Image (cartoon, helix red, strand yellow):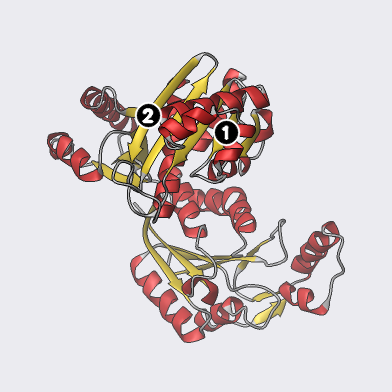
Amino acid sequence: MFKVEIITIGDELLIGQVIDTNSAWMAGELGKAGFDVQYKTTVGDNEKDILEAFELAFSRASIVLVTGGIGPTKDDITKKTLCKYFHTQLVFDEKTLETVAEVVRGLQKDLNELTRTQAYIPENCTVIQNRMGTAPITWFEKEGKILVSMPGVPYEMKWAMNQEIIPRLQKTFPVLDFIQHQHYWVKNYSESLLAMHLESFENELPGFIKLAYLPTSGLIRLRLTGKSSDKVGLQREMDTQRQKLLALLPNDIVSEEDANLENILDKLLKEKGLTLSVAESCTGGKLASLFTAIPGCSEYFMGGVVSYANAAKQHILGVNPSDLIDFGAVSEPVVTQMALGAQRIFDTDCAIATSGIAGPGGGTPEKPVGTVWIAAICKDKMKIEEFHFSQNRESNILRACNCGMMLLLELL
């Protein structure tokens, strides 16, 4: 297995101004292609630190993939540092200028002097033309190892990886091992309880298969990963382990999709031709935002109501005012009527409703912080459940969203 290191460059990553999503996405795609990401490094816009990162990466990896720090501005340092590391110089490349000019024209902008500097590239590299942006992609070889520098802009990096980098790496480094992943969304367990329940299963796994626990808000994601040069044998053993897991968790696996719950529901709702609406109190619109962030969600997502105040629950969703008085907003009767109200208002097949005490204040001895009632409905079927989460507001909101989607997923 050829080892890969990902280096992300930029002061903005170190100070938390920008979250590094590039390396996570790259690692996922590389794993699918059979490459083993062993290391990730983040370094600021400092020549000395970048040079040290390059040196360390080449000492322990065969493939070094770099994103960020290339562009037309003075703080973009990567190209100059690459020249220093590979003992070369920047030279003007006419072909790169043509590509930059095409991209700029496509954006209906003019080619200025700063953008023109993108056509200067290290002399001893292979240039891969960037069809999505102005910063060129550069490929270096050193002692049988590869370093590739790409833009830090996510959509440019993703295009480069899928269209150019991974195909070239597969030709240069034939994959020796096959990698297979299985994914399981598990409910009803904390991480420690699930680990105890699966202890014997995990201890009996063959050496080429590993089990990983990935806790998320309200649920656990299990990932079973196998690596072997025997593709057929690997598939057979992975199938065997899957059957064992299903037997150990007969009523607890919500999904086997390698995706977030909103993406799983997105796929299911589209496949079944069903529509969805939401009625939110404690989640404050977060649930709706998860769906509306998905391209094409308008095919099924009709809308939502953030009924934070009791008056909104009553006047918009049609919740019975006496139920609000007798049972309180955080109760089974109220959340049931909220779901039915959303279903009626938006004329949808499905609906999810949430009402709870997110915290940190507002709790009582009878209903402490973290108490949440959730209802999910699909046509004439409904699931309603009371949950008890934590004292943390952000965590409670996310867990309520996940559990609401989980209930609908079970209905579907």
For image coordinates 44% across by 46% down, the residue present is 398
Q: Quadrant of residue 321?
A: top right
- On screen, residue 367 above or below 345: below
**From the viewer's perspective, is 46 left or right of 193?**
right
Where residue 281 sits in the image (x, y, percent)?
Answer: 52, 41
- On screen, residue 182 above or below 47: above
Q: Amino acid at mark 1?
A: Val
- Residue 283 appearing in the image: yes
Alpha carbons under labels 1 and 2: distance apart:
16 Å
For image coordinates 87% across by 69% down, the residue present is 110
Q: Determine crowd level at label 1: few under 14, some 14-19, many 20+ residues with C-alpha closer than 10 A.
A: many
For image coordinates 33% across by 67% down, the residue present is 60
Residue identified by numbered label 1: 278
- Residue 255 appearing in the image: no
Q: Check whether the beta carbons of the residues at disc 1 and disc 2 lie within 8 A of each other.
A: no
Where residue 182 sits in the image (x, y, percent)?
Answer: 35, 34
Residue identified by numbered label 2: 385
Is 347 or 38 nearer to us in this picture?
Answer: 347
**Which of the two discs, 1 and 2, labels the residue nearer the N terminus?**
1
Q: Amino acid at mark 2?
A: Glu
